[in-house]
Image (cartoon, helix red, strand yellow):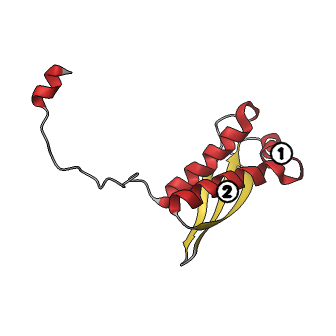
């Protein structure tokens, strides 16, 4: 570390102090949805799920997001949705709360689950 200090110099920061990421809000929404699904499902579902944000509509008082969560098998679709849609509701609620905090506005999140043949 001492050797590195010899070559280090003071410089203005590249980003503002409150700058969090260079990723778009749309990208972050996709990641929050995927993170919520993986955290809630733990070992029940492999990490091979994918999320596609179809619509990201910014309005004056809210953001509306329509997204699809893709799984590889029809049996995984049932796990992701859960009995009485309980699991998909939990995933949506967790992701929406994170997005509302991060984006500093109300978020309406609509999720669908589809099987992908890819």
Q: Report the residue that reaches farthest toward the right.
A: 84
* Residue 111 lies in quadrant: bottom right
Percent across and percent down for residue 29 are 56, 56
- Where disc 2 sits, the SS reads strand
When the figure is inspected, residue 4 is found, relative to residue 12, above or below; the finding is above
Residue depicted at x 79% and y 46%: 77
Residue depicted at x 67% and y 56%: 68
Q: Is residue 26 left or right of residue 96?
A: left
Q: Is residue 116 visible?
A: no
Percent across and percent down for residue 8 are 14, 33
Q: Report the residue that reaches farthest toward the bottom.
A: 60
Residue depicted at x 71% and y 34%: 42
Q: Nearer the viewer, residue 76 or 83?
A: 83
Q: Nearer the viewer, residue 36 or 5?
A: 5
Percent across and percent down for residue 90 are 75, 50
Q: Is residue 23 left or right of residue 101?
A: left
Q: CA distance from mark 1 to mark 2?
A: 15 Å
Residue depicted at x 84% and y 53%: 85
Q: Is residue 82 left or right of residue 32?
A: right
The circle on residue 68 is 2
Mark 1 crowd level (few <14, some 14–19, many ≥20, 10 Å Cα): some
Quadrant of the image containing the C terminus: top right
Label 1 or label 2, whichever comes before in sequence order: 2
Percent across and percent down for residue 49 are 66, 43
The reply to whether dot 1 and dot 2 touch (C-beta < 8 Å) is no
The circle on residue 78 is 1
When the figure is inspected, residue 113 is found, relative to residue 46, above or below; the finding is below
In this rendering, the count of numbered labels is: 2
- Where disc 1 sits, the SS reads helix
* Residue 109 lies in quadrant: bottom right
Q: Is residue 72 visible?
A: yes
């Amino acid at each position: 570390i001492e050797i590195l200090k010899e070559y280090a110099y003071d410089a203005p920061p590249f980003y503002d102090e409150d700058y969090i990421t260079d990723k778009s809000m749309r990208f972050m929404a996709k990641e929050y949805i995927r993170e919520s699904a993986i955290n809630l499902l733990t070992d029940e579902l492999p990490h091979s799920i994918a999320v596609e944000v179809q619509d990201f509509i910014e309005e004056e008082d809210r953001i509306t997001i329509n997204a699809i969560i893709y799984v590889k098998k029809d049996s995984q679709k049932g796990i992701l949705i859960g009995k009485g849609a309980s699991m998909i509701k939990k995933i949506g609620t967790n992701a929406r709360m994170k997005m509302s905090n991060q984006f500093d506005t109300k978020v309406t999140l609509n999720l669908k689950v589809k099987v992908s043949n890819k």
